[in-house]
Image (cartoon, rainbow, N blue to C red):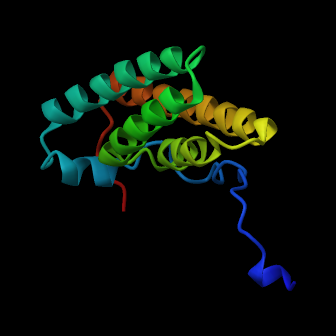
Amino acid sequence: MPAAFAKPTHRVSAPPAPAEPAIDVAHLGRMTFGEKGLESEVLRLFDRQASMLLARMQDAPQAAVAAFAHTLNGSARGIGAWQVAKAAEAVELATGGRNQPDFRGALENLVAAVAAARAAIADLLRTGATERQP
């Protein structure tokens, strides 16, 4: 059977290139109508939620991990944390499968992406630098 017709597998890809910013501040600005106070509040909420969801994933069954990853994916897309969204989606796809290395790798990528986003959020909140990027 030609490879093109083989049953697709869900592979965990490497995290996105680091050149992509952890937080797309232009997208964040559009989602918050440019209101700086709202931007700060949304970033704080995401930071808290991401931390809580990762903690809950630690000992949860894979079905619960998939649900937590799905929630994180949606939240990440709302603030422009594209690396987190991609990594969370990979965790969702890897859950329920029999390939534990793929699942563990996807979870490790998610943890790294969330750490990068949280560091960027801390920097943005500390400096107030949510100005638009071209």
Query: Residue 39: where, in percent of width, then height?
Result: 22, 35
- In the image, 48 versus 53, the foreground residue is 53
Name above or below for residue 89 compared with residue 9: above
For residue 19, say whether it is visible.
yes
- In the image, 123 versus 30, the foreground residue is 30
Quarter containing the N terminus: bottom right
User: Can you name the residue that lies furthest to the front here?
Assistant: 1
User: Can you name the residue that lies furthest to the right here?
Assistant: 1
Q: How many marks?
A: 0
Query: Residue 106: where, in percent of width, then height?
Result: 67, 39
Whether residue 53 sits left or right of residue 86 in the image: it is left
Q: Quadrant of residue 26?
A: bottom left
Q: Quadrant of residue 53?
A: top left
Which residue: 78% across, 75% down? 6
For residue 120, say whether it is visible.
no
Quarter containing the C terminus: bottom left
Which residue: 71% across, 53% down? 13
Whether residue 129 sits left or right of residue 60 in the image: it is left
- In the image, 109 versus 36, the foreground residue is 109
Query: Residue 36: where, in percent of width, then height?
Result: 17, 36
Q: Quadrant of residue 128?
A: top left
- In the image, 96 versus 87, the foreground residue is 96
Name above or below for residue 36 compared with residue 2: above
Which residue: 50% across, 36% down? 66
Query: Residue 92: where, in percent of width, then height?
Result: 54, 43
